[in-house]
Image (cartoon, rainbow, N blue to C red):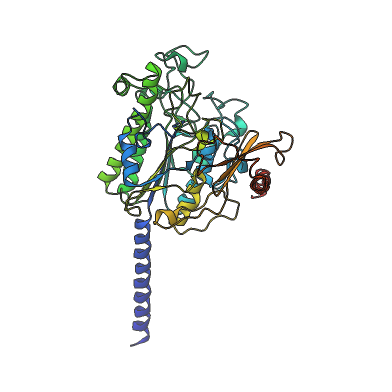
Amino acid sequence: MNNKSHQQFVLFSFLAVLIGLLESLELKAAERPNIILCMADDHGWGDVGYQGHPYAKTPHLDRMANEGIRFDRWYAAAPVCSPTRGSCLTGRHPYRYGIYTANAGHMKADELTLAEVLKQKGYATGHFGKWHLGTLTKTVRDANRGGTEKGLPHYSPPWVNGFDECFSTESKVPTFDPMRNPATVSREAKKNVPLGGSYGTAYWTGPDERVSDDVLQGDDSKLIMDRAAHFIERTSKAKKPFFAVIWFHAPHTPVVADEAHRALYPDHPKALYGQHYHGSISALDDQMGRLRSHLEALGVANNTMLWYCSDNGPESNVNTGAGSAGSFRGRKRSLYEGGVRVPGLLVWPEQVTKPSRNAVPCVTSDYFPTILDALGLELPDRPLDGVSLMPLIRGQALNREQALCFQSKNVATIQRGPYKLVSVRSKEDRLKAEGNELYNLENDPSETTDLAIKHPRVVKELEAKLAAWILSCQKSDRGADY
């Protein structure tokens, strides 16, 4: 073989290897799972058919529970919405990134979101529905904080947090005709706003890109799914993996349902309000069924990791609200079980081939490490409060050695083994406890019997671990992780 022929042989061999590598990379890209995080707003643990609710009609969520993994101890990271949403995207507790409650703080630029990680790995990323992790406009008055002097420092929309495509609101909207102040359910109407007039918020698709109110009519869950379905179809046909965050407003107030969904509950014990409340959940449930049908029609259902949960427990007290926390103590804004234990489901046919029920405590902070683990990606070098659930998803045992901790206002809790410590913290120094309660969640999931006096050693051990975790969160919040 002469020198020229040898050079050509080497060149062709190199090209063959390169083509093989590219084909291998393309194969791996095709095998990467699509990921969808769906979340309801204020959807109580008990407000689904599969939990035995006496009249809630949720056939599509029930089907997910019967075909995938049903998490009987799935927790929102906080008892209110904004903090929980951030935990889904960062794997971290809200007190690490400074969103302590609703309508406060924003997603910081130095926080690493799932959308940013996945976008770097070739995923199309989209956010649809309620954002609530910062304001979306600097130019016009919008929702709770947008376009105001108070809101300017908190400008942090989805499109600066890794999302390519958006159809997003800053905060709540009515669950039917989302741009209009509801005239039919007076207790849900916005104060100081004419009934039937503008609700004072907007859907945004990008910087100063406001969606016309004229096209935002009808059921809000359907409007959200219309945009999400279009995004999923385009990216699927382009053979590109996608990450879609679909955060419904239902059944958060103002809760309004159309006539067809109200008609599902003619004898609701909470009368018209209850018909609207559970009607909006059934309307949301319809869209979950529509989503699954859409994925199947596109041929991508098997390789799509589809999650569903709520951001916290049901609104209002048991006497005035229609939502159910099941048998659990507390509701929204409480760190007792009813405020943070919520519906949790996963369907992923390619990996979850047999339906199962899981009693291991899991939390919205687990999304981040689970998804990175599924893709074989390294975790960032910063404290995470979530753990990977991939062993559980693969049918293996998951022993959650890392304690599950929560903070909200002046209360903090820690779960380890069967025990849960509920600790009232000093307002001057959150590292100090002013009072502790201890419950055995295995024997007493409704938290009726305080065991603190009976088990002082357990209280002391959990209190020490909780204080150390609170200190870690304080360091993170001061920017030590960046």
**Residue closest to the eye, 50 or 388:** 50
Q: Position of residue 78 (x, y in %)?
A: 55, 37
Looking at the figure, which quarter contains the N terminus? bottom left
Instruction: Please report the residue visible at 42 percent of the width from the left and 18 percent of the height from the top.
Output: 180
Along the line of sight, the residue nearer the viewer: 129 or 312: 312
User: Residue most toward the front?
Assistant: 454
Disc tally is 0
Can see residue 363? Answer: yes
Q: Residue at x 50, y 48 (%)?
A: 366
Extreme residue in the left direction = 297
Q: Position of residue 156 (x, y in %)?
A: 55, 37
- Whether residue 120 is visible, yes or no, is no
Is 395 in front, or is 233? 395
Relative to 270, say whether 479 is above or below: below
The residue at 40%/24% (across/down) is: 277
Residue 304 lies, in percent from the top left, at 35, 49
Front residue of 145 and 360: 360
**Residue placed farthest to the bottom in the image?**
1
* Residue 216 position by quadrant: top left
Location of residue 233 in the rendering, given as x and y in whole percent from the top left corner: 31, 43
